Amino acid sequence: MWLCNSSIGRKVIMSLTGVALILFLTFHACMNVVAIFSEEGYNMICEMLGANWYAVAATAGLAALVALHFIYAIILTLQNKKARGNSAYAVTDRPAKVEWASQNMLVLGIIVVLGMLLHLYNFWYNMMLQELLPNGAHLYAADGVYWIKETFSCPVYVVVYLVWLAALWFHLTHGFWSAMHTLGWNGKIWFNRWKTISYVYSTIIIAMFALVAVWFYLGSLCCGAAC
C-alpha cells in the first residue's frame, strides 16, 4: 500500500495523525479553561466523560495516533539521514529559510511525548484508570479540579509543564502548516496564510494550557500550598 511504502504516503499519515492530535488538543484546552471559570462545570465534564466506553475508546485512539505519528517521524528522519549520506555529517550553516523547529521536530516530538506520558500519569492514571480498575476507584477519581490543584501546587510540575508546552508550541507551529502543505493546500497564497494561521492557532491553544497551570499555581500560593 502506497501510504505505508512510499515517503509521500508516510508524510500523509504523519499529517493526518497530526491534524487529529491538533483537534484533540483544541478540545482538551477548551475543557481545561472551564476549570478557571467554574470548578463545578469542569467536574461535570469530567464526570460526563468518566470511564465511559467512548472516553476509553478516545484514549486508546489517541495513544494509537501518537504512537503512529512518532513511529513515522522516526522512519522519515532515518530515511532523510540515509538520503543525505556522508553529507549528513558535514558542518554546514543552517539555511536562512529553514525554521529551527523544522530541523528539530524529532527532538521536539520526544519532549512532547514525554510530557504527554507525565500528563497521563498525573491525570488519567488518577481518574479514568482508577475507575476502570476493580475496586480501584480513588476518592477523587471524578474530581478533576482536585487533581489540577494538586499537580500545579508543585512549582516543579509547573516548570516542567511549561517547558513541555513550549516544545509543543514549536512542534505545532511547524507541524500545522506542514500538514496542510502535504495534504495539498500549498498554493502560493494559502501557503503563507496557513503559516500565519498555524502560529496564531497554536499560540492560542498553548496559552490556554499555560494559563491553567499558572492560574492554579498562583492560587496555591494564596492558599499557602507547597510541593
Image (cartoon, grey):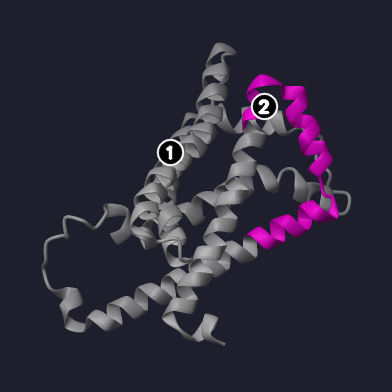
Residue found at x 69% / y 47%: 124
Front-lying residue, 177 or 222: 177
The kind of residue on which mark 2 rests is Ala
100 shown above or below 74: above
What secondary structure prevails in the magenta region?
A: helix
State yes or no: residue 50 in magenta.
yes
State yes or no: residue 202 in magenta.
no
Instruction: From the viewer's perspective, tell me whether residue 181 is left or right of residue 58.
Output: left
Residue that badge 2 annotates: 35
Badge 1 or badge 2: first in the primary sequence: 2
Helix or strand or loop: what does disc 2 sit on?
helix
Instruction: From the viewer's perspective, tell me whether residue 181 is left or right of residue 93.
Output: right
Residue that badge 1 annotates: 200
Front-lying residue, 117 or 80: 80
Helix or strand or loop: what does disc 1 sit on?
helix
Q: Position of residue 181 (x, y in %)?
A: 41, 62
Q: Is residue 199 visible?
A: yes
Task: Give the label, 1 or 2, closer to the camera.
Answer: 1
221 shown above or below 33: above
Q: Position of residue 119 (x, y in %)?
A: 58, 46
In the picture as drawn, the residue positioned furthest to the right comes out as 135
- Magenta-drawn segment: 33-62
